[in-house]
Amino acid sequence: AQSVTQLDSQVPVFEEAPVELRCNYSSSVSVYLFWYVQYPNQGLQLLLKYLSGSTLVKGINGFEAEFNKSQTSFHLRKPSVHISDTAEYFCAVTFTGGGNKLTFGTGTQLKVEL
Amino acid sequence: ETGVTQSPTHLIKTRGQQVTLRCSSQSGHNTVSWYQQALGQGPQFIFQYYREEENGRGNFPPRFSGLQFPNYSSELNVNALELDDSALYLCASSLEGARKTEAFFGQGTRLTVV
């Protein structure tokens, strides 16, 4: 079975500052990793995904994440945040061949302040 | 192409009642997954349907059941509702097979059990 840990429940940051949202996973098999964003009263939107290949993955809205197998991490980063980035961010994992049966972390609330 | 749509968007039920939630998958997708997201938590996998057959189930009791129709739309049924069933229910569709895609989520149905 897989599990995901998002250590930070809330991350406050000032506009135009960089941000990193942390994600660690646990799995005994190879995995695919995802970051989703959820705006208030909405569903989940895919930001980026790691399936294979380059460990640095670029996504939408200027976000990127780096897969680190030795540290079992998949941290999300953005060099300069905007007010509109305020949302809940979820890291998710599925094992390769798992057919999109996702295991999610508990989420990190990113609050961007002026 | 149309996205994933869920109905209704909100509903209120009484403890002990039964409820049916509906999901129309994205055009071209053959797989639907259902998730329960309690307040302040990450989504939890309920089950998945692939070509009208259940293809994996999370840790949910049998009173949570589902269907997938020939057009790949899906229903989630919950019997004997409990207060703890109050949550946002998310449907995600994907294409499984040789040209698999990631999961695309609908806006969710907010269920309140009183």
Image (cartoon, coloured by chain):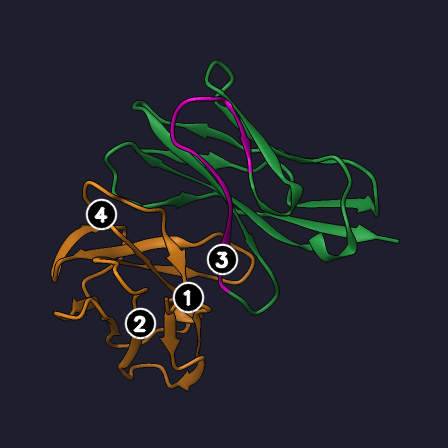
User: What residue lies at 23% left-to-right and 76% top-to-bottom?
Assistant: B79
User: What residue lies at 78% left-to-right and 40% top-to-bottom?
Assistant: A80
Residue farthest to the right, as pictured: A114
- Judged from the image, the secondary structure of the residue bearing numbered disc 1 is loop
- Judged from the image, the secondary structure of the residue bearing numbered disc 4 is loop
Q: Is residue B55 above or below residue B28?
A: above
Q: Chain of mark 1?
A: B
Badge 3: residue crowd in 10 Å (few <14, some 14–19, many ≥20): many
Which chain is green in the rendering? A
Of callouts 4 and 2, the N-terminal one? 2
Image location (x, y in percent) of residue A105:
49, 43
**Which amino acid type is shown beneath numbered disc 1?**
Gly
Q: Which residue is mark 4?
A: B96
Q: Which residue is mark 2?
A: B23
**Which amino acid type is shown beneath numbered disc 4?**
Glu
Both marks 3 and 2 on one chain? no
User: Residues at badges 1 and 2 in contact (C-beta under 8 Å)?
Assistant: yes
Side (left or right) of B90 relative to A11: left
Side (left or right) of A104 relative to A106: left
Give the CA distance from mark 3 to mark 2: 15 Å
Image location (x, y in percent) of residue B107:
46, 69
Q: Which residue is mark 1?
A: B106
* Region in magenta: A43-58
Q: Chain of mark 3?
A: A
User: What residue lies at 25% left-to-right and 38% top-to-bottom?
Assistant: A98
Look at discs 4 and 2 and give the one toward the viewer. Answer: 4
Residue B101: say if magenta. no
Quarter location, residue B69: bottom left
Give the CA distance from mark 1 to mark 2: 8 Å
Give the CA distance from mark 1 to mark 4: 18 Å
Name the colour assigned to chain B in the rendering: orange
